[in-house]
Amino acid sequence: MDPHTSVARSPFSSVVQRRRSKSHRQSYRSNVGTMSHLGYTPGFTKRRLTTCRLAPKRCSTAEINPEQRALLVREWQLSYVTPLYRFQHGHLKTYSRQLAAFLVSERQQGVAAEVGLGSTLKVTFTLVAGMAQTEEEADTVFIKILSKTPMAAPDDPQKVLWSGWLTCVGGNPDYLRTLPEDFVCLPLFCSGGTEGLTALVKAWFQRTFDCCFGRLEINSVNLQWLAALWTDCHARTSIKQLKLVWSLPAEPPMEVIYAMHAQDASELWRSVRQPGLREEEDDGSVGLAEVACFFKGLKSHFYRHFRVELSAGRLTQVSTALGSAKHGGRIKISNSSYMITTLTLLTECALLKMPI
């Protein structure tokens, strides 16, 4: 086959193979079984995973405030958190003092010595406006921990040791309305810093708001959704390249890196954006069948050129110029214009992962 006639031209695609040796727990789901192909979950009795999403819409630069830009500066580790009991957005200054006092106490007991807390410590809680999509959603909260090292000069500024945020973007309104009024739902927790300091922050939240945290991974299904949604943005904002990483069952394990030129990925995506494949044909929504068809085309193209069957493995990482996501629950949002699209999907993941 002439590579120049392929929808995803192989000269613009590359592959690298690497081998490597008491909390409120009202659940968003009920009787959830093990997830299977592209969101179909036999164990669901009340709700299935989303099979149709709105296509990404670009936010104007004027709509992005400085607080939102702080969410773009680093890669975040994801967790889910159950609803917070008696959390009040009007008490953020109080929470700043309480968390700082808790960290000082831990440092004095020697527990926090290894996480780098200096002699001076400051904690800030701030609101991130403009993230909530409905009246039921609570405003996003951003947290920073700043400190000076013991060797710092008196006039040296404090450095950010840790930052994180709690958010709910596009959360299911039916679920949010069922929460008792004393509970605030901010199910997606994003942390950036040492594991030790993250553990201390979580411990304070658990003690103060009677909640619990859990690890939030991004499974292959949702990585495929992100790849499709980001590729859909290319006509408006260049994604530069679609990079996919698969883990294949081999001995020793094999990692396959599949990089495709943005235009080739976009052409393939447009070829599967047919009305007949959509759940709804009226609003430019992205359907599950389109995502499945898109990845079937990617895998078929890869097999034709490299004779490697990617379906035998697991998708573990997706990256474009708009962001990157890893199976282990690490996310980086590189473009504020499509941040809401990404966070809506991740909020759904967090709500579905919360324990019953």
Image: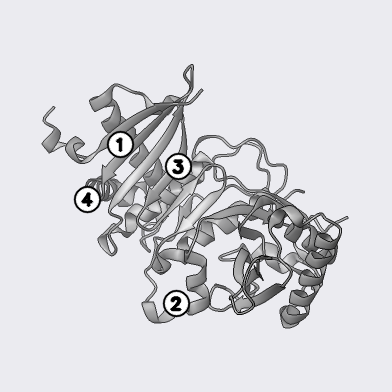
- Dot 2: what SS? loop
For disc 4, the marked residue is 263
| Residue 288, x across and y down, in percent | 44, 46
Q: Residue furthest top?
A: 251
Counting every numbered tag in the picture gives 4
The front one of 256 and 150 is 150
Q: Are marks 2 and 3 in contact (CB under 8 Å)?
A: no
Residue at point 67%, 51% (across, down): 195
Residue at point 20%, 41% (across, down): 12
Q: What residue type is labelled 3?
A: Gln
Q: Earlier in the sequence, mark 1 or mark 3?
A: 1
Can the viewer see residue 273 in this picture?
A: no
- Determine the CA span between mark 3 and mark 4: 20 Å
The answer to whether 10 is drawn above or below residue 110 in the figure is: above
- Determine the CA span between mark 2 and mark 4: 27 Å
For disc 3, the marked residue is 317
Is residue 65 shown left or right of residue 108?
A: left
Mark 2 vs mark 4: in front: 2
- Determine the CA span between mark 2 and mark 1: 35 Å
For disc 1, the marked residue is 297
The front one of 163 and 136 is 163
Is residue 163 shown left or right of residue 52?
A: right
Q: What residue type is labelled 1?
A: Gly
Is residue 332 shown left or right of residue 154?
A: left
Is residue 234 shown left or right of residue 108?
A: left
- Determine the CA span between mark 2 and mark 3: 27 Å
Q: Earlier in the sequence, mark 2 or mark 4?
A: 2
| Mark number displayed over residue 64 | 2
Q: Quadrant of the N terminus?
A: top left
